[in-house]
Image: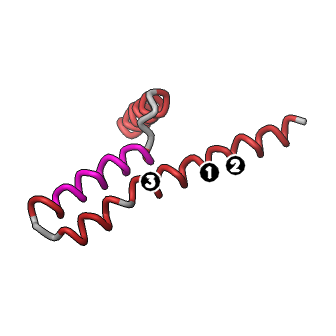
Amino acid sequence: MSSTTDTDETNALADELESSGLGPAALSAIGSVALALYYYYIKGDEQRGQFVGLWPATILAMASYLKISRMERDDADAE
């Protein structure tokens, strides 16, 4: 019984994050920015910080591509 409640709460949280635009891709991008800043400023590893700093653009571009592909597929199915 508890697992059903947990699943419902998890689904509600996922729906809320998705509607606010903070889906998994956005959270991953934010996390990689934080990681890049950590490597660059805290660890002093500038090259690694710059490399990790390139990830957010790639993550968000992939998410956009997948969303557009899904929308096109839904349009084709609707016709």
Q: Nearer the viewer, residue 27 or 47?
A: 47
**Circle 1 sits on which residue?**
65
Find out whether the residues at labels 2 and 1 contact each other: C-beta distance under 8 Å.
yes
Relative to residue 18, is residue 77 drawn left or right?
right
Q: Position of residue 43 (x, y in %)?
A: 10, 66
Residue carrying label 3: 57
Count all numbered tags in the image, as a single digit: 3
Q: Is residue 26 left or right of residue 44?
A: right
Q: Is residue 2 left or right of residue 21?
A: left
Q: Please name the amino acid that badge 1 sits on.
A: Tyr
Are the residues at dot 3 and dot 1 in contact (C-beta closer than 8 Å)? no
Q: Position of residue 33 (x, y in %)?
A: 28, 52
Which mark sits nearer the N-terminus, 3 or 2?
3
Tell me the kind of residue under disc 2. Answer: Ser
Q: Which residues make up the magenta segment? A: 25-38
**Is 33 contained in the magenta span?**
yes
| Quadrant in the rendering for residue 41 | bottom left
Cα gap from disc 3 to disc 1, whole angstroms: 12 Å
Q: Which residue is mark 2?
A: 69
Rendered image quadrant of residue 42: bottom left
Say which amino acid is labelled 3. Answer: Ala
The N terminus lies in quadrant? top left
Instruction: Spot the residue most to the right.
Output: 79
Residue at the (44%, 53%) spot, across then down: 57
Residue, x 47% and y 58% (percent of image)? 58
